[in-house]
Image (cartoon, rainbow, N blue to C red):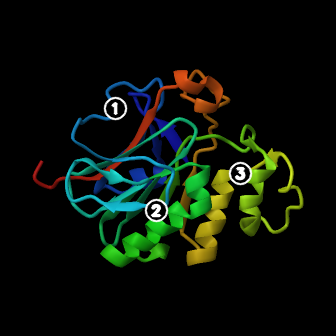
Amino acid sequence: MFSLDNRNVFHATELDEQSWLEHGFGARISSGWPDTTDLATVRQIHSDVVVAAEHSGCLAEGDALITNRPGITLSVRTADCLPVLMADPRNRAVAAVHAGWRGVVLGIVPKTVQAMADRFGTRPEDLVVAVGPGIGVCCFEVGPEVAIQFQQWFPERSDLTSTTKVDLRETISRQLRRNFGTVQLFATADLCTVCKPELFHSFRRDREQAGRMVAAIRIQDASR
């Protein structure tokens, strides 16, 4: 379940219930977000590269960040691609993922889960995963050269050799189930960035005129 706060930043209830972290999914109408300039970022390249953040700043090329260090704000920028935030309550580790269709096909989300398992001992069944506002299946129509790349996750579909619509959220859900079994808390914001110009930036809708929105997550610094 998702809600708007008084800054017009979206929050996932499942992550809000984790008192040890802060998070938000920015919109075009958000004010004062992110509430810090001290962000850990990557130069997003629509890849499957996961970067471990030991400090803030632009750290590398890639499309996902992970950390277990308090006070580091992981952030990704989107304008139709899906922002995915994850938290491991048992080991107190977090992740922020930029998941466009190319990254989804490459498995950026399950690879981020695996990176957290390798580095922090994360158990997939402990994860809280929230997929924020992004392009919906209603507007993500693609040609056969793109659609066919989703066939392995939708074996029941016979239309992926032609122009058709693809559900990126469902793809991520199926990837996680296939790789790790059931992720207990998996929340999606059924909000399409293309359909709601009053709320969201959209590259598909506005092309080069589109702005970007920031999704961010951080472990609270106990010293603050």
Q: Secondary structure at mark 3?
A: loop
Q: Which corner quadrant of the image does residue 149 belong to?
A: bottom right
Determine whether label 2 and label 1 are within 8 Å by CB.
no
Q: Is residue 195 above or below residue 148?
A: above
Q: Which residue corresponds to mark 3?
A: 167
Q: Is residue 1 above or below residue 198?
A: below
In front of the other: 205 or 185: 205
In front of the other: 60 or 183: 60
- Three-letter residue code for mark 2: Val
Q: Which residue corresponds to mark 2?
A: 128
- Three-letter residue code for mark 3: Asp
Q: Position of residue 151 (x, y in %)?
A: 77, 64
Q: Secondary structure at mark 1?
A: loop
Residue at the right extreme, as displayed: 158
Side of 74 relative to 143 (left or right) = left
Identified at 35% across, 67% down, the residue is: 89
Q: Position of residue 92 (x, y in %)?
A: 30, 66
Mark closest to the chain's N terminus, 1 or 3: 1
Identified at 54% across, 70% down, the residue is: 183
Tell me the distance, in whole angstroms, between the alpha carbons under discs 2 and 1.
22 Å
Mark closest to the chain's N terminus, 2 or 3: 2
Residue count near mark 2 (Cα–Cα under 10 Å), binned few <14, some 14–19, many ≥20: many
Tell me the distance, in whole angstroms, between the alpha carbons under discs 1 and 3.
28 Å
Side of 81 relative to 195 (left or right) = left
Residue 33's disc number = 1
Label 2 or label 1, whichever lies nearer to me, is: 1
| Residue 96 can be seen in this image | no
